Image (spheres, rainbow, N blue to C red):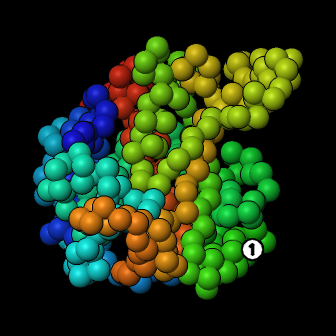
C-alpha cells in the first residue's frame, strides 16, 4: 500500500474503519510553530456526523491525542503523531462481504489485490473513516500556511441536482460556515437538505461538489513538470474516498471556449500583476499566478444504500442480490468539506516548503 503523501511536508496515514484507532504522522512540519490541539479538534468536529443532514448514525467522539512532536505548545521539527480512537465499531454487518462484494465499494478489487487478507469491516483501509487522519494533518498544514498569510477554505457548491450560485473566492471565508452544509447560499443550502432527505427516504444516496479556494498564494509556487500545483493538489484530492472528478478554474468549460475567451488577461493593480478574470483557477504551467487557487472535487453518491443491488457470490460463481446493512451516510458531501480543505492545504504546504515560500523554522 502507498500510505504517505508529500515530499518535505510528508503525511503518513494509518488505521482502519473498525480497528483500534485512526491516525496520522506528519513529518517535516516547520519547528517553532505554535500549535494548540484545539485547532485540530475544531476541524475534527466539523467532520463529525453529529448534526449533519443524512449523516451516518455512527457516533465517534474523535478526540485527538497528540503523541509526539510538541514541546511547550510548539512544534519541535520531529514527527507529529496524532490519533483518534474508534469507539463505536459494529462489524457484524460486514462478515459476508468477502464473498458478496458491495457494488461501488473496493471490496472486490481489494480482495483480489491483497489475497483476501484485507480488513473488510466498514471498508477497512478503504473507508471514508480514514479521512479523520487527513483532517488532523490538514489542520497543521493550514496553521503553517497562515504564517505566510495563505488561507484555505472550502464550501459545498452542489448536492445532487441542486447547485448554489457562484460565490467570489474572497467572500468564501466569511460565508462558508453559515449553515451545516457549508454552503455560501442559504436558499441553496435549504434545497440541498431536502434533496438529501428525499434520497434517504427512498433508501438511496446523493453526491455533490465541493469547491476549495486558497487565498494569498504568491506567484511561482509549484514544481513543474510532474509536480505542478494541479498535479499535486489533484493527487491529494483523489486520495479522498468517493472523489471521482477534479477540475481547476473553469475546468471542462474551457474546452468549449475559444482562446480569446479562455485566456485570462493580465493587468496591473496597486503595482501587482493580476488577471482580470480567473478561469485558469490561479495556475498556469503548473505554477501559481498569485490569483486565488480555485479547485472543485466531485463526490459520487455513497455506494452503501439500503435498496437491493445486484452483485455476485464469489464462492458459488453466481449472480445474486445484496441489501446492505450497517450505518451509512445518505450524503457525505457536508462532512467532506473540511477534508477537501485539509488535502488542498497539505499539498500547498508541501509545495511552499519545496520552493522556499515557507521556511523550515518559524521565526
Identify which residue, 84 or 112, lies in the foreground: 112
Establish if 176 lies above or below 52: above
Q: Left or right of 14: which side holds 253?
A: right
Determine the residue positioned at 29% across, 80% down: 93
Q: Left or right of 313: which side holds 31?
A: left
Is residue 75 among what the camera can see? no
Identify which residue, 25 or 275, lies in the foreground: 25
For the C terminus, the image quarter is top left
Disc 1, SS: helix
Q: Position of residue 207 (x, y in %)?
A: 59, 62
Quadrant of the image occupied by residue 218: top right
Q: Position of residue 92 (x, y in %)?
A: 23, 82
The crowding category of the residue bearing disc 1, from other C-alpha atoms within 10 Å (few below 14, some 14 to 19, many at least 20), is: some
Determine the residue positioned at 78% across, 72% down: 187
Establish if 21 lies above or below 228: below
Determine the residue positioned at 69% across, 46% down: 170
Establish if 188 lies above or below 24: below
Identify which residue, 104 or 342, lies in the foreground: 104
Quadrant of the image occupied by residue 241: bottom left
Establish if 102 lies above or below 232: below
Determine the residue positioned at 65% across, 69% down: 178
What residue would you read off at disc 1?
Answer: 191
Amino acid at each position: 500500500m502507498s500510505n504517505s503523501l508529500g515530499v518535505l511536508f510528508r503525511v503518513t496515514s494509518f488505521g482502519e474503519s473498525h480497528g483500534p484507532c485512526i491516525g496520522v504522522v506528519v513529518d517535516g512540519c516547520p519547528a517553532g510553530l505554535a500549535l494548540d490541539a484545539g485547532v485540530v479538534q475544531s476541524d475534527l468536529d466539523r467532520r463529525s456526523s453529529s448534526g449533519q443532514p443524512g449523516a451516518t448514525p455512527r457516533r465517534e467522539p474523535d478526540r485527538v491525542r497528540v503523541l509526539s512532536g510538541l514541546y511547550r505548545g510548539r512544534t519541535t521539527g520531529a514527527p507529529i503523531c496524532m490519533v483518534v480512537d474508534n469507539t463505536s465499531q459494529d462489524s457484524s454487518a460486514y462478515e459476508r462481504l468477502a464473498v458478496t462484494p458491495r457494488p461501488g465499494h473496493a471490496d472486490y478489487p481489494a480482495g483480489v489485490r491483497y489475497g483476501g487478507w484485507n480488513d473488510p469491516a466498514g471498508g477497512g483501509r478503504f473507508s471514508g473513516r480514514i479521512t479523520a487522519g487527513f483532517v488532523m494533518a490538514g489542520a497543521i498544514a493550514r496553521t503553517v500556511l497562515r504564517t505566510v498569510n495563505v488561507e484555505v477554505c472550502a464550501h459545498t457548491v452542489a448536492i445532487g441536482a441542486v447547485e448554489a450560485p457562484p460565490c467570489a473566492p474572497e467572500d468564501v471565508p466569511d460565508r462558508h460556515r453559515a449553515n451545516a452544509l457549508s454552503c455560501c447560499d442559504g436558499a441553496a443550502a435549504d434545497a440541498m437538505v431536502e434533496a438529501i432527505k428525499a434520497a434517504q427516504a427512498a433508501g438511496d444516496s446523493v453526491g455533490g461538489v465541493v469547491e476549495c479556494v486558497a487565498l494569498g498564494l504568491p506567484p511561482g509556487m509549484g514544481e513543474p513538470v510532474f509536480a505542478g500545483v494541479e498535479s499535486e493538489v489533484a493527487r491529494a484530492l483523489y486520495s479522498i474516498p468517493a472523489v471521482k472528478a477534479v477540475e481547476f478554474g473553469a475546468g471542462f468549460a474551457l474546452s468549449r471556449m475559444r482562446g480569446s475567451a479562455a485566456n485570462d488577461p493580465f493587468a496591473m493593480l496597486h503595482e501587482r500583476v493580476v488577471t482580470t478574470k480567473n478561469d485558469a483557477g490561479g495556475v498556469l504551467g503548473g505554477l501559481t499566478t498569485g490569483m486565488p487557487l480555485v479547485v472543485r472535487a466531485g463526490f459520487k453518491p455513497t455506494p452503501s444504500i439500503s435498496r437491493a443491488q445486484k452483485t455476485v457470490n464469489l464462492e458459488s460463481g453466481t449472480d445474486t442480490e445484496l441489501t446492505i446493512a450497517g450505518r451509512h451516510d445518505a450524503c457525505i458531501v457536508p462532512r467532506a468539506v473540511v477534508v477537501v480543505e485539509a488535502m488542498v492545504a497539505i499539498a500547498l504546504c508541501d509545495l511552499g516548503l519545496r520552493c522556499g515560500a515557507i521556511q523550515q523554522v518559524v521565526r
